[in-house]
Amino acid sequence: MKSPGLRIKYIRTEGLGRKYNQDEFASTIYLSQSQLSKIENEENDVTEQTAYIIQNVHGYNMNWIINGKGPMNYFGEEKKEGKLNLRFEEINHIYRNVLRYPKSKETIEAYFKIKDIHRLAIDQIILGLLSDN
């Protein structure tokens, strides 16, 4: 992998345990699909900020991404492939559900504004509803 763009394409297509399309991967690093495409096709340079985000979200060393030097992995294999990706997928799943149900954002924000005792009661109600299914 001779260029930063090709290294990022490798991460996206082979380095994360499954092949992400450009749109999916771009959303994990706060880029648009078109920005990612330009980076992978070497039309735009990889910024340090983007490399830093990839390092912290996906566990790939930013120095390796930008310069091709140093170890490829920033975290140990266990963290890179396990805990970090699992946590991101969990957060991403919740976020996409909130987007699907517009009222849920307002409800979640209200939930954190109420007293702890009321929050516990709501938790009990929700768990009861789930056990009925």
Image (spheres, rainbow, N blue to C red):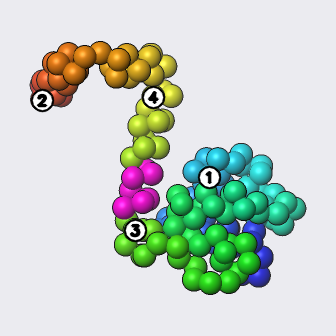
Image quadrant in which you'd find residue 116: top left
Read off the residue under disc 3: 79
Q: Nearer the viewer, mark 4 or mark 2?
A: 4
Q: How many marks?
A: 4
Query: Marks 3 and 2, Cα distance to the nearest angstrom?
Result: 33 Å
Q: Nearer the viewer, mark 1 or mark 2?
A: 1
Q: Nearer the viewer, residue 120 or 36?
A: 120
Q: Secondary structure at mark 2?
A: helix
Query: Marks 1 and 3, Cα distance to the nearest angstrom?
Result: 18 Å
What residue type is disc 2 on?
Answer: Ser
Read off the residue under disc 4: 98
What residue type is disc 1 on?
Answer: Ile
Q: Secondary structure at mark 3?
A: helix
Magenta stretch mostly in which secondary structure? helix
What residue type is disc 4 on?
Answer: Val
Relative to residue 73, is residue 23 drawn left or right? right
Read off the residue under disc 1: 29
Read off the residue under disc 2: 131
Q: Nearer the viewer, mark 4 or mark 1?
A: 1
